[in-house]
Image (cartoon, helix red, strand yellow):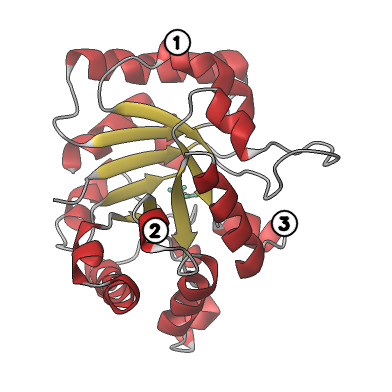
Amino acid sequence: MRKKIVAGNWKMNMDLNEGLALAEAINSHYAVNPPDGKEVIICTPFIHLGMLSKLITASGVSFGAQNCNDHRSGAYTGEISAAMIKSTGAGSVILGHSERRTLYGETDELLAAKTAEALRNGLRVIFCCGEVLAEREGNNHFGVVRRQLEKGLFTLTTEDFVKCIIAYEPVWAIGTGVTASPAQAQEMHAFIRQLIEGRYGGEVAAETTILYGGSCKASNAAELFANPDVDGGLIGGASLIKEEFCNIVSAL
Ligand code: PEP
């Protein structure tokens, strides 16, 4: 049975105190109400990571980062390595988010290198893919997602690929308030699962967790999560509000 997961992407929000207070509130909630076989991951800015291993104690709850460098160490001023992230006790890292692809020019090839480095250091990778509006309107969305996965992720061996979670995030739905319809989400998730089957076989495809991301909130989460190939969500804005985030987890 593949894992059901809700991951929060805090992006560049929350100073140190605000972030620790939010993490503490989420942890306290799940210490009392365990997430019942589901996994909850909070992906915070780097500044919080070092403090979270003491703070996140509830079972089923873990934390991760939102990016890492593709090199092991050295003269890369301002960068953070996968080994550094791992040393904080973090379990995961988001890679390939559309904001990093667009704003920081991250290519499929760079993401393949980052993914390999994260896995080499024992991190799980939440690998994001998704098309922009013009690509969907041009009926190119399947081709774009196929390319992102083939070049960025399918370079991995089976042994490494099974440590990855995929997040389908249509870029036109991220932070816009416009959500993919449940049918659009299901259609793309089923397509992604087919691609995985073609590359790694049916057993691996059936076990791969595929999250939906893009303006998912407590009020629309249940209908998105009801789809057979949607195994949870990657949540941006709504992950910054404890009640909203926990209600999304409950909807799963
Ligand atoms: C995201 O940035 O991963 C995301 C899904 O954002 P939002 O939920 O705010 O659309």
**Location of residue 116 with respect to 88 vertically, above or below:** below
Q: Which residue carries the number 1 mark?
A: 54
Counting residues from the N terminus, which is met first, the one under dot 1 or under dot 3? 1
Name the residue located 49 percent from the left edge and 72 percent from the top edge: 131
On the image, the x and y values in percent for residue 217 come to 32, 45
Residue 33 visible in the displayed image: yes
- Near mark 2 (Cα within 10 A), the count class, few <14, some 14-19 or many ≥20, is many
Q: CA distance from mark 3 to mark 2?
A: 25 Å
Residue topped by disc 2? 161
On screen, residue 52 above or below 132? above
* Residue topped by disc 3: 104
Residue 12 shows in this picture: no
Dot 3 beta carbon under 8 Å from ligand 1:
no
Specify the amino acid type for callout 1: Lys
Mark 3: secondary structure: loop
Image spot of residue 249 (x, y percent): 24, 37
Amino acid type at circle 2 is Phe
- In space, the residues marked 1 and 3 are separated at their CA atoms by 32 Å
View extreme (bottom): residue: 138
Residue 207 percent location from the top left of the image = 22, 57
For the point 18% across and 43% down, which residue is it?
A: 252
State which quadrant residue 99 falls in. bottom right
The location of residue 235, given as percent across then percent down, is: 40, 44
Say above or below: 250 vs 173. Answer: above
